[in-house]
Amino acid sequence: MQSSDAPSHIVHAPQQRYRDGQAELTIRGLIIGILITLVFTAANVYFGLKAGLTFSTSIPAAVISMAILRGFRDATIQENNIVQTVASAAGTLSSIIFVLPGLIMIGWWTEFPFWISFWICALGGILGVMYSIPLRRALVTTSDLPYPEGVACAEVLKVGSSGDSKHASDIEHGRAGLLAVLWGSIVAAVFAVVVQTQVLAADVAQTFRIGKRGSVSGYDFFLSFALLGIGHLVGLSVGIAMLIGALIGWGWGVPHFSAMSGDITTAAATLAQKTWSTKVRFVGAGAIGVSAIWTLLKLVKPVARGLASAMAASRARKAGRADTLPITERDIPIGIVGVVTLICMLPIAWLLGYFGNSSGLGAHLPTLIIGGVAYVVLMSFFVSAVCGYMAGLIGSSNSPLSGIGILVVIGAALLLVIGVKPYVGPAASKALMAFALFTTAVIFNVAAIANNNLQDLKTGQLVDATPWKQQVALIFGVIAGAFVIPPVLDLVNHAYGFVGAPGAEARAHPLPAPQAGLISSLAQGVIAADIDWSLIRIGGLIGIGIILLDE
């Protein structure tokens, strides 16, 4: 489903063929981007573990970059775009916290091994960049998806660079845009102060019981100026889709399943949250699974056209006609994409083998390595396409990454149940669970980076950036973020611990890490054969019904 009512002011940028002597991929830009990445990644890891949410770093990075580079005469909008592209890895790579702490929670790890954790993040991130390259032509160049955060970031970059223009109309447009940004920032800041001083409430939530069967429901009205802005960018149809999802979840799901539990003693708020986490989320995973498969089927033709276009561009380069390609259509050559992807599979195979051997599953290494690599290759492309589409539709921050993680870990655990579990004893169940989480962590990183990269490439399209330079820049950001995540995770683990981990009850304030807890419990449920598949089937039927209505 593509949004048809996105704001009319969103237009495709003209395609430039040449850009003489303008700075874009520079050493200083990479250094600024890497430094921002280091800081924002650490902040995102802590915030994500605490609240279960990470924040997009593209726009803050763009603002910081423009402030720093304003002092350089040769700074350009494209160079600022490179900085935000590098730094955007901080907001997405840190999503690994939705999976990796699960290995601590199940008691398999007591700390995060630096190099193992680093390579999980780095290899998954690089694969995410590679997989999103052929998807760019299908989901960005020839698509009418709104890409709300990509468009917003492009507008910020244009406003910040308007002073470089010699045309009066451009300068006037830049001033108007700058005033809009300033007024929006002032209003949001004033509202934040009013909320913090408790003059007004930003969040009004209430849970309540319905009838005599013990069913509960509730509402949570949260006023966010950031979400208002995103709503303007994505359009009405996407907002209605999200509202329908909330109504299904809280208007039917939570009341229905809480009534079935027959629990009339637990506090309404506690029961509602428990029902949402243990029942309704699995229904949502089933709906996401069906929609993901449907989305992938719809993307077969556009992706095929994108690959054909990429191959044509590669032939043009080999024939010495690279300059005939517009700068906004110059990706990393598809041949290099294939080679880098294959090279990444070698250390991934080693990681899977090392982890399997150290888990006591050494007798089954050929099955684990071959099956694991095949699963990474195929599932990574699947989730990259789905996440890229969802990022274009509702934004990277709202893309259902945790739902994708649920599908990936269920698939990995099912394959282990079929291919390995019959040949090992009951004592190996925890090792199988750990291997499923380990494999999921790699694929999850691929999904997270693809989810972000297409948003960045949309920004680049609107500011006449060169795609291959953005793709290289994001690889730098991935590697920088991968260096930061393991030590920050380790510090947080030693300082606070995680809810559900062995010994967590002795900690004063263990961090909830809700997604990691859910995904690890799913792996355990599938391998122990005690998961409630009926919830996922219900979600699948809901998804089919909505698709039929929409089509």
Image: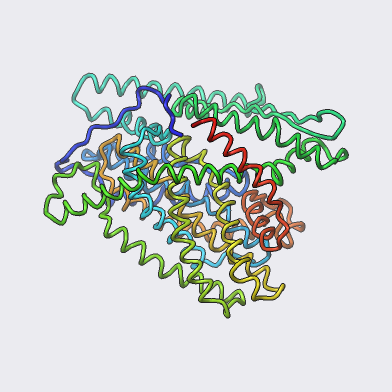
Q: Quadrant of residue 255?
A: top right
Colouring convention used in this rendered image of the protein: rainbow
> Which residue: 60% across, 76% down?
361
191 lies above or below 516: above
Q: Where is residue 247 in the image (x, y as percent from the top left)?
A: 65, 29
User: In the rendered view, would you say 411 is above or below 454?
Assistant: below
Report the residue at 12% width, 55% height from top.
319
Q: Is residue 186 left or right of residue 197?
A: left
35 and 422: which one is in front?
A: 422
Residue at the spot 76% in from the left edge and 39% down from the top edge:
257
Above or below, 225 relative to 475: above
As rendered, which of 515 and 133 lies closer to the eye?
A: 133
Q: Nearer the viewer, residue 245 or 162?
A: 245
Quarter where residue 214 is shown: top right
Q: Is residue 143 left or right of residue 428?
A: left
Q: Where is residue 46 in the image (x, y as percent from the top left)?
A: 57, 49
73 horizontally vs 229: left or right: left
Query: Can you name the residue that lies furthest to the left here?
Result: 320
Residue 401 percent coordinates (x, y): 53, 46
- Report the residue that reaches farthest toward the bottom: 363
Q: Position of residue 104 (x, y in %)?
A: 64, 62
Total numbered labels placed on residues in the image: 0
